Structures are given as structure tokens and as C-alpha cells.
Image (tube, grey):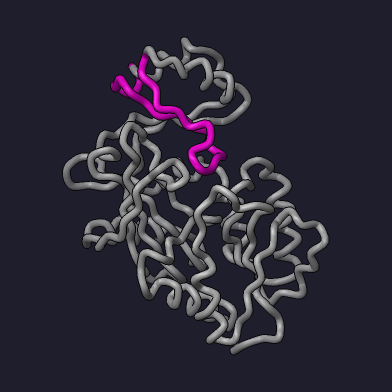
Amino acid sequence: MSSSKPIAFLSMDDLVGYVSDDELAYAPLQELGWVVETVSWRDKLVQWEQYAAVIIRTTWDYQKNLPAFLEVLTEIESRTRLANSLAIARWNADKIYLRQLESKGVQIVPTLWGENLRDAVEVGQWFGELGTNEIVVKPTISGGAEYTYRLTPNSPQIEEAVENLASRAYMVQPFLNSIIEEGEYSLFYFNGVYSHTIQKTPAPNDFRVQEEHGGIIEPFSATPELRATAESILSLLEETPLYARVDLVREGSNSFALMELELIEPSLYLRMDADAPSRFAQAIDTFLRG
């Protein structure tokens, strides 16, 4: 099935400084009869009904104004098809969803949740509560490791963390050495079907795995344990998303904890698997025909 209407890949005003490879899906989509246009979610002049569907992709600044972003998605879904859906976006935009998944049996990294960080004294209490000398604290609504801090009890960044989290909800976790030693695994699923996996490790003297911070990205052959963990998490969702990225980290010798379940605008790393662009295009085609 094809349409005279194009598809929109929802993006942001300017991708300078970011790494995106969504364009790898354009040719296989064209072979299936679909033309793709990239559109900023901030463009107030777009007539969304001119598109057969809008696929949320590289909207990597949405966390700066989440209410406005959700308002745009609401408008889009009222005029055409949206993937992933507005319901998924609302749920996945705040990392408090991890707490909900934990209540359903999903293993996550031990986490403290709070709002409006008061002072360094409060930060100091976290180390004892988590039984560690090194923690990571970040906002529950964030992207690209923005306002994310790796702290020790004497870290000079504590004051900066207090300042930037004073009016935000936040989460605190023990720092896992496995992120340095082994890295983080991202498994990708299109329409609920496994596609590919990557391994992300931080640059020397860093802890962030994002490419924008020097993270090293490599293709990885997912073990049965990794896939089983990811798929057990996805089975808990109320609807099957067009795309999902499951970020896992080893916690203990034989288990993996969920770091994030990315359902809004994850980088899909299509370039890491030769067949991934075609799989994604076919998933979009199936979504549109459905």
C-alpha cells in the first residue's frame, strides 16, 4: 500500500551537534511507495493532515518544553496517524515510568526519587541510603544526559547539581562500574519484532555513553539473556509501539537491569546493522497498512 501523501519524520529546528542516521530509511521507504519529509515539531505552520503519518524521531529538545511538545503531539494525533502514540509519549516522557515497571517485577537499578533538591546535606544522605560512595543523579524529564551528575561525597559538582535540580523532579542511583567495564546494551524492536543490538561504552574518564559525549558505539550480538530481559519488559506494555529501544546494564553477575525504555525519540542506530533500515521501513509500512 502506498499513498499520495508523504510521511513526516518529526524532528527539531537544528540537529547540529547531534548524530542521526534516520535518512538511511528513506530509500527503503521509497521502494515501498512512501516519501519522507523531515519536519520540526516547533513549526507552527505545518498542516499535519497533509501527511499519511507522523513518526516521532529526532525531537531531542522536547524536554526543554514538554507541555508544548505534548500539545503538538495532541494536535498531530487529532489530524493524522502518530507513532509512537500520544499515550505512549505521555507515559514515557517522565522516567517515573521506571518506578511503575519496577512495581510489575522489572529489575531496575536501585533508585531514590525526589523533587526540588534542597541542599548539599540532602545529597550527602543519598550515599548512606544507597550504600555507595558514588552516585548518579539526573532529572526524571531529561535527554542527552543533560543535568546528569556523577557524584562522590566530596564532589565539587554537588553545588551545581543542587542549583540545577532545585526546581525539578529527580532520580538518584548508585553508579555501576559495569557501565565503565562492560558498557550499556541497547536492543531495538520494530512493531515488537527484534531488529538489532548495540553496545555503548563511555569515553575514557567519562561515564556518559551518548555519542555527543564521546561514547563508543559498536554492533553487538545479543545474548539470549539480553533478549529475554528486553522482551519480558516489552510484554508489559499496553500497546505495541512502532519502535522501542531497551537500554540494559549488567547488575550482578547474571542479571540485567533496565536503565531506560526509550519509546519517544530514541536514536535507532540504523547504520549499525545493514538490514535495520529496511526492517524499520517495513515496520512503518505495516503500521500504515494497519
- Residue 111, located in which quarter of the rendered image? top left
Residue drawn at x 71%, y 86% as measured from the top left = 4
> Residue furthest toward the right?
45
Most foreground residue, 81 or 284 = 284
> Residue furthest toward the top?
121
On whether residue 34 falls in the magenta region, the answer is: no
Most foreground residue, 142 or 21 = 21
Residue drawn at x 28%, y 38% as measured from the top left = 180
The part of the chain drawn in magenta is 128-153
> Residue furthest toward the front?
16
Residue 102 in view, yes or no: no
Task: Judge left or right: residue 270 versus residue 66.
Answer: left
Residue drawn at x 53%, y 13% as measured from the top left = 119
| Position of the N terminus by quadrant | bottom right
Give percent across and percent down for residue 74: 72, 58
| Position of the C terminus by quadrant | bottom right
Give percent across and percent down for residue 156: 44, 15
- In this rendering, the answer to whether 37 lies above or below 72 is below
Give percent across and percent down for residue 52: 68, 77
All told, the count of numbered labels is: 0
Task: Judge left or right: residue 280 versus residue 15.
Answer: left
Task: Judge left or right: residue 47 versus residue 205.
Answer: right
Residue 14 in view, yes or no: yes
Give percent across and percent down for residue 46: 79, 64
Residue drawn at x 41%, y 65% as measured from the top left = 271
